[in-house]
Each structure stands twice: as structure tokens, then as C-alpha cells.
Image: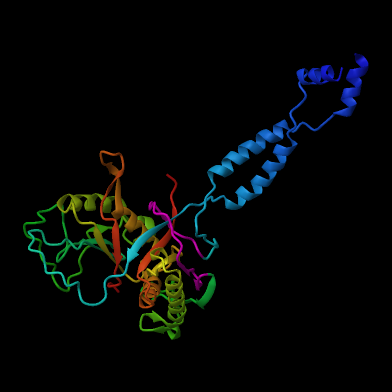
Amino acid sequence: MAGGKGRRSLSTGEELNLIPIMNLVSILIPFLLMAAQFVHLAVIDSTLPAIGPPPETPPEEDDDPPLQLSLVLTGKGITVAGADAVLNPEGAEGAAPAAPVEGEEDQPTIPCKDPNCATPDSYDYEELTRLLGLIKDEYPDDENVIMVPESRIPYEVIVKTMDASREDKSASGEDGKARTLFPFVVIAGGAK
Amino acid sequence: MALKKKARASVSEELNITSMMDMFTIILVFLLKSYSTQDISVAASSDLELPLSTSAKEPQLAVNLIVTKTQIVVDGVPVLDLTMVPDEENPGMELISVPEDEKKGQMITRLYDRLLEKAEQAKALGEASGSKEHEFKGRILLQCDKTLPFSVIREAMYTAGQAQFGEFKFVVYKTSG
């Protein structure tokens, strides 16, 4: 008799007891809420420029001089400079880079989109990425870039410039990843 | 038969929690997706708004140097307050800067003392643990407000450099994607 009763209650569909699961879930939710992260953080690596004498390695007998790419951020725009001259990849770069005339106010390589560079977005980062892509074509092994921001440049512009010089999202390689340009940034505090 | 039905209705008129379970399951999945075990955290405030970046490097645990619009904080302890000075090139505007009496050249003296202390602690800890992993590498996490002028950041970086921290990690918000 008892067995028959039990079987019948099973077959009529006694509801599953969800209370223990509810207990479990209501404990899990506060815990997960605490550990949930809605903003994701990342870091950008940078090092100080080496202080002191340069490393004691003999200068390599190399045909290619080091690039020493530097980006000068000013209140007018971004100047892209190489080892000893302002680079102009679109012109005849290797042929004869004209020495900048002393005392003359140079125009930046990439001027701001609006003349006053009022907001961080007025700098032309897309153009910078394109230009650095051209330089990378010339110097495929170089990965360092020196940033020389002016004192009054906001931090956000520096970060955005680092982003623009790190990789080129539009030009992806064979593996589908963005093309790496110059990922190693050194921040120099030169320009006043 | 009729009697039985009535009895059941009166005994087990329970709350139907199936729909609540459905909801909880969805919340659970969502929270599990956003679960993360990152070491560092950012105390968001109106004074500290980190810039956005496309960088994808994971942050590691290190000494935390936070430069907000109003103060400099090392590992949660405020070190000094920043001031506003009139901007010489843009009359009427103001720039955030480190007070002149706190500086020696480019070095922020109080911050230097604090960071040197941190460096000594980290070195002692690294030696005590004996493992290569915990060795002092001069790593420092910099959380800076995105509107700060470079001059303040340069002074903070210079000071950190003098206190043997040479490996800077700029903390940024990762853009989605």
C-alpha cells in the first residue's frame, strides 16, 4: 500500500524542491557581485630613458643606422622625428632630409585637425598611425619610440598617441591581428 | 476524488519559484561572465578618471602611485595636495601643478621619501622570500587623471625614477573589444 502511494505521487509529478538551489544561488549572487568587474583595466608599459653613460657595446658596423624614432607632442600637433632629422616618409626621405633651420618655427609633421588643438580628439591619430606604418615599412625591426610631450599636453593625448603608435588596427597581418608598429615607449621629458 | 483535490489545494498552495529561478539563472550566468580576479582596483572618483586605451596588457601587482586632480596618493595613503596655478600661456586658465615648496628641482621631496620607503620594503620582502619571482624590479603602477598636464606626470615619474622605480605601468581603462 505504502509503495503504491509513493509511486503514485511520483507519477503525478511532485514538484522538484527548488529551495536548496535557491539558497545556493542567493549565496552565489552576492559573492559574484562582489567579484564582478564592469570596467576592465589594462596597463601600458614604459621605461625611463637610461640615465648615465650609454651601454658599453661597440657600435655595430651596420648599414642601417638606428632609427631612434621620436614623437614630439606640442600644442600644435605631432612632430615625427628620426635620429637626426624630421622624417618625411612621403617625400624623398633617404635622399636628402633637409636640416631644420635653427630658430625657425617648424610646422609639426601632423598638425591638429583644429588649429588650437583644444581637445584631445583634435590631434590626428589616424594620420599618425598611417605615417608610422610607412616608417615601419622602412625599418621593420625597430620597435622603440621616444615620446617627447610638452609640459602642458594632457595625459590623455599621450595615452592616445601611445595607442596610435602601438598598432595599426586597419592593417591586419595574415593571422588577423592588428599590425604591430612601435610598441615600446620611452617617455622623455625634454620639451618645455 | 473531489475531496482529494480540495485537500491538496489547501495544503500546498506554495509560492511558485520557478520564474524566480529562471531570473537567478540568468543573473548568475551574467555575473559569472563578468567575474574577474584582477589584482588591482581603481577607486573611481570624479578626481581620478583614467584614460581609455586599446592596450591589452594585464596589470600586475606593484606599488600604486595615484595622481588625481587634487592630490598624490601612494598605496592608498595621501602624500601631498596639488594646487592650481594660473596658466601663463592661456590667461584666465589654470593648470594643475605641484606646489613649489614641495619640489627640489623636478623632484617632489615628500613623494620621494615615501617611495624610497616603499622600495626598501619591497627589497627587504624580495630578499626574505628568496625567490626570483618576488624580487624587487622597480615596477610601479601609475594611475593618473586624464586631464593632468604632462608636467605633473613628468615630475611624478622623475621622482619615482630617483626612488629606484624604473618600470612604469600606466593604468588605463580597456576599451571594449
Q: Looking at the picture, tell me which residue is in the foreground, A167 or B125.
A: B125
**What secondary structure is the stretch in magenta mostly built from?**
loop
| Quadrant assignment, res B104 | bottom left
Which residue is located at x 22 percent, y 52 percent? A131
Which residue is located at x 37 percent, y 55 percent? A121
| Quadrant assignment, res B101 | bottom left
Q: Looking at the picture, tell me which residue is in the foreground, A129 or A42.
A: A42
Total numbered circles:
0
Q: Is residue B66 magenta?
A: yes
Give x and y (percent) for residue A189: 30, 72
Which residue is located at x 91 percent, y 23 percent? B7
Q: Looking at the picture, tell me which residue is in the foreground, A89 or B108.
A: B108
Q: Is residue A188 above or below residue A8?
A: below
Give x and y (percent) for residue A159: 37, 59
Q: Quadrant of the N terminus of chain A?
A: top right
Q: Is residue A161 magenta?
A: no
Give x and y (percent) for residue B43: 54, 62
Q: Residue furthest top?
A: B1
Q: Is residue A67 above or below residue B105?
A: above
Q: Is residue B125 above or below residue A11?
A: below
Can the viewer see residue A68 in this picture? yes
Q: Residue furthest right?
A: B3
Instruction: Please give the range of residues in magenta.
Output: B48-75
Which residue is located at x 46 percent, y 60 percent? B50
Can the viewer see residue A154 in this picture? no
Q: Looking at the picture, tell me which residue is in the foreground, B94 or B54.
A: B54
Q: Quadrant of the C terminus of chain A?
A: bottom left
Give x and y (percent) for residue B17: 74, 33
